[in-house]
Amino acid sequence: MQQWTVERFFDGAPSALRLYRAVEQVAAELGPHDVRVSKSQISFRRRRGYAYLWRPGVYVKSAVPLVLSLALPRNLESPRFKQTVHPAAGTWMHHLELTDSSQLDAEVRRWMQEAYEAAG
């Protein structure tokens, strides 16, 4: 069976790949981590996952090229999140639709840093 790679995950989706590369750069600035690619998502991990990227158009009709989901130890109230869910005690998943790399501003970088530290 063919291994999932970043290139395979984004096959036919160049705008989503460009956004992934921008998120990947932010993650690299946070510190050491692992990247896991599966059929459904790409995860950035320390002891556990802290950031996940997925393509909503694969599952539903959507013009959004990429969603960044951040696993945080608290609920953040921000209108920037499309949805926030509480899948487990002490974990809130915050879903941010990405359409342009300019969205990866200082606020999102702080959220990623918090998620990175919490995944410790």
Image (cartoon, rainbow, N blue to C red):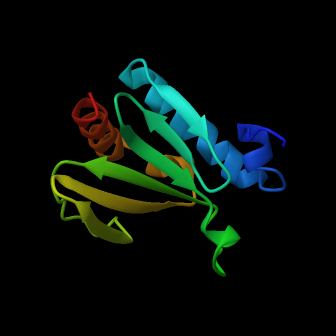
Q: Up-down: is 46 above or below 91?
A: above
State the image quarter where residue 51 is shown. top left
Q: Is residue 90 left or right of residue 7?
A: left
**Residue 76 pos. (x, y %):** 19, 59
**Residue 22 pos. (x, y %):** 57, 38
State the image quarter where residue 55 is shown. bottom right
List the single residue furthest toward the top. Answer: 32
Q: Residue at x 32, y 40 (%)?
A: 106
Q: Residue at x 45, y 52 (%)?
A: 103
Where is the N terminus found, in terms of image quarters? top right
Q: Is residue 88 left or right of residue 30?
A: left
User: Which is nearer the eye, 90 or 7?
Assistant: 90
Q: Up-down: is 31 above or below 53?
A: above
Q: Is residue 71 left or right of residue 61?
A: left
**Residue 41 pos. (x, y %):** 58, 52
List the single residue furthest toward the front. Answer: 1
Q: Up-down: is 107 above or below 21?
A: below
Where is the C terminus found, in terms of image quarters? top left
In this rendering, the count of numbered labels is: 0
Q: Residue at x 67, y 71 (%)?
A: 57
Q: Up-down: is 34 above or below 13?
A: above
Q: Is residue 27 left or right of residue 55?
A: left
User: Which is nearer the eye, 103 or 40?
Assistant: 40
Q: Residue at x 79, y 45 (%)?
A: 8
